[in-house]
Image: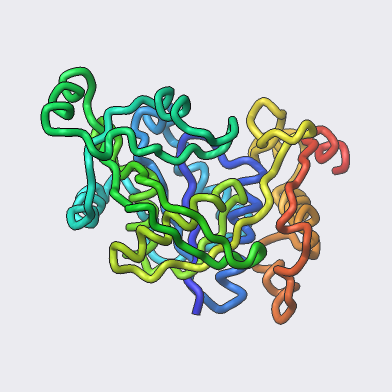
Amino acid sequence: MTTGRFAPSPTSDLHLGNLRTAVLAWLLARDDAGAFLLRIEDLDQQRVAAAPQVAQRQLTDLAALGIDWDGEVVRQSQRLDLYRDAAAGLETYECYCTRREIAEASQAPHGSYRPYPGTCAHLTRSERAARRAVRPAAIRVRAHGAAMTVHDLHAGEVSGEVDDFVLFRADGTPAYNLAVVVDDGLQGVTQVCRGADLLDSAPRQAWLARELGFVPPSYAHVGLAVNRVGERLAKRDGAVTLSELESSGLSGRQVFETICRSAGLPAAGSAPELLDAVRGRDWWTIEAIWRPWVVDARAIIDRR
């Protein structure tokens, strides 16, 4: 039985692309009579503090679309000791590089993930002391050039090299790659459905899961919502959140039907209705689910 999850960051209201991913993650789990978990990824306390009450609005929007979840909502900010304990047995080292230094040392194309070139991997004790006097250290895992293969529901077998990625940022905050792997492992998540932009990170996270003694999940990386020029959807693109669309005259049912149409699914009015409509069908083979969704907020409103 599948255990899926949705894990938003409470730094801004969920836009149509976030809601679409949540619907698909919920549907994949519930179609297998599985569990669905909700986790708030609130480790970036500075950004979270700048957007109070966002997490509650996110939960309200999900519930308005008929998305339910099992158990209590987990908040990463309350699990810091779990991340530190999990990482205690890993081989790690201090890193003093800035993002600019890593970008300049890497050969990756602009905009792509830049694997860490190993600049600080073999510093002597005196070299570490000298750099520590200039700036605090991040903590990286020593992966020894490992490689990992994961299975994605659409992309199939995806392989990637594992670089020495960050486990703890320079301020001591657990990094995303560590926290998400520990949470998925401890919560028993067996399937991760999320945006296609995170596909490249899946081998790295699956490798870490295995190193920590967890069974890596399977993956389903779905198409992103983008604006008319192909950029990731953002607030600047107009009325793209549920509350904004409702304020423009759309009902919650109409918004959900729009999400369904974007993925080639039956135009149901809520998540439970959608589940009833697709149950027993190979709906995940619909190509529109995996392609980017070009969102024109003005056209969506005018179509009401």
x then y, percent, for residue 172: 23, 36
Colour convention of the picture = rainbow
Q: Residue at x 68, y 51 (%)?
A: 223
Nearer to us in this view, 56 or 80: 80
* Lateral position of residue 50 relative to residue 109, left or right: left
In the picture, residue 221 is in which quadrant? bottom right
Q: Residue at x 78, y 42 (%)?
A: 294
Nearer to us in this view, 200 or 193: 200
Q: Residue at x 58, y 55 (%)?
A: 22
Q: Is residue 264 above or below residue 115?
A: below
Q: Is residue 206 above or below residue 77?
A: below
* Lateral position of residue 180 relative to residue 17, left or right: left
Quadrant where the image shows the C terminus: top right
Nearer to us in this view, 274 or 169: 169
* Lateral position of residue 15 relative to residue 78, left or right: right
x then y, percent, for residue 303: 88, 42
Q: Residue at x 63, y 60 (%)?
A: 24
User: In the orientation shown, which residue stands out farthest toward the top?
Assistant: 134
In the picture, residue 52 is in which quadrant? top left
